[in-house]
Image (spheres, rainbow, N blue to C red):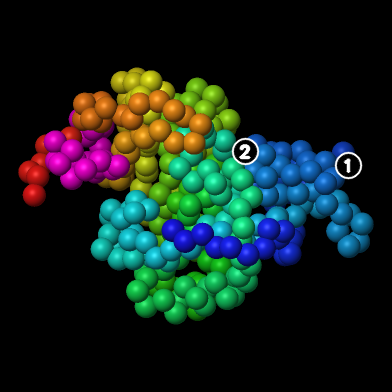
Amino acid sequence: MTKIKQNLVPPHKREAMFFQPEKGKVRCLLCPHYCLIEKGHVGFCGVRQCSESEEGQLKLFTLNYGEITSVSLDPVRKKPLYHFYPDGNILSIGTFGCNFKCSFCQNYSISQYRPESQYVSAVEMAGLSLKNDNSIGLAFTYNEPSIWYEYVYDVSKEIKKRNNEHKVVLVTNGYINEEPLKLLLPFVDAMNVDLKGDEEFYKSICLGKMAPVINTIRTAYKEGCHVEVTTLLIPGENNSHTTLELLGDFLASVNKDIVLHLSRFFPRYKLNRPMTDIEDMKKAYEQLKEKLNNVYVGNVSDQEKAYIMGTAFM
């Protein structure tokens, strides 16, 4: 992932697509936080601001439209997507901001802070992606793409207008309302959605709710989008037998063939605790393999993976 260095102040504010005026403020309708934002202030995600339009009306504007903080040509497997062009590469871009506050965030430097960025228009970004012969398409990733909604929508729509076979991928926490999700899904080919834990985990660790994420997974799958799911196993937080039973039962109710990636936790950002024990990884894998047909493990060595999954080490 390459960090881009340029402007610190976004020059291209863009009117948001999902909001409504309310009592001298604006209500953001993009995600389940439903932030009620005063003039000059931003919502929970840090990138949607209540400001006056040129006509003097209070509206919601995005501060990260077209602002690229990170870009890389990644293996599709790194997203991770194992059942969607797994041998290909995909151009991957990110911006800044997030609508969760996870204490273990891997990319906290762009999700929780305002890094340097470079503006690239939607038309230009679509063109750059389409011209890349070494890539199957474009992935919106690194930070949370749903709070980059207007840009993701414009770029994806432009890509599909020019070449419907060029792939669009989201790597997302799934915390988005159903109306904007359904508007975007016709332009999205695949998603990897984080399913982080039970309701208490979402409430205490992410400062969000579980139900909207479940709805995103179910809706995207129903609408024909390829969906894979990732759960980062954090000792003492979301790796209990009860929690894994809950997650496994839900995913099996969507489809027993849905792909689940179990990822090993390492200390990161504000959460300083021991890494996930390999024996705990093995127990979780065996428990969920009884419910789902496609379970994989990540953030482990090849030898550890072979031990956990009961396969030969090559």
Q: Amino acid at mark 1?
A: Gly
Eyeballing the image, is 164 above or below 106?
below
Nearer-N-terminus badge (2/1): 1
Viewer-closest of 111 and 210 = 111
Secondary structure of the residue carrying tag 1 is loop
Please give the residue where the numbered disc 1 appears in the rendered image: 24
The quarter of the rendered structure image containing the N terminus is: bottom left
Q: Would you call the spot at circle 2 few (<14 residues within 10 Å), some (14-19), or many (20 or more)?
A: some
Q: Which mark is residue 32?
A: 2
Q: Amino acid at mark 2?
A: Pro
Helix, strand, or loop for circle 2? loop
Which residue is depicted at the point 64% across and 43% down? 45
Residue 32 locus on image (x, y percent): 62, 38
Residues in magenta, as a range: 285-307
Position of 249 relative to 227 (above/below): above
- The image shows residue 288, relative to residue 50, as above or below, that is above
Which residue shows up at 26% across the image and 63% down it? Answer: 87
- Quarter of the figure with residue 184: bottom right
Q: Is residue 72 visible?
A: yes
Left or right, residue 198 beside residue 175? left
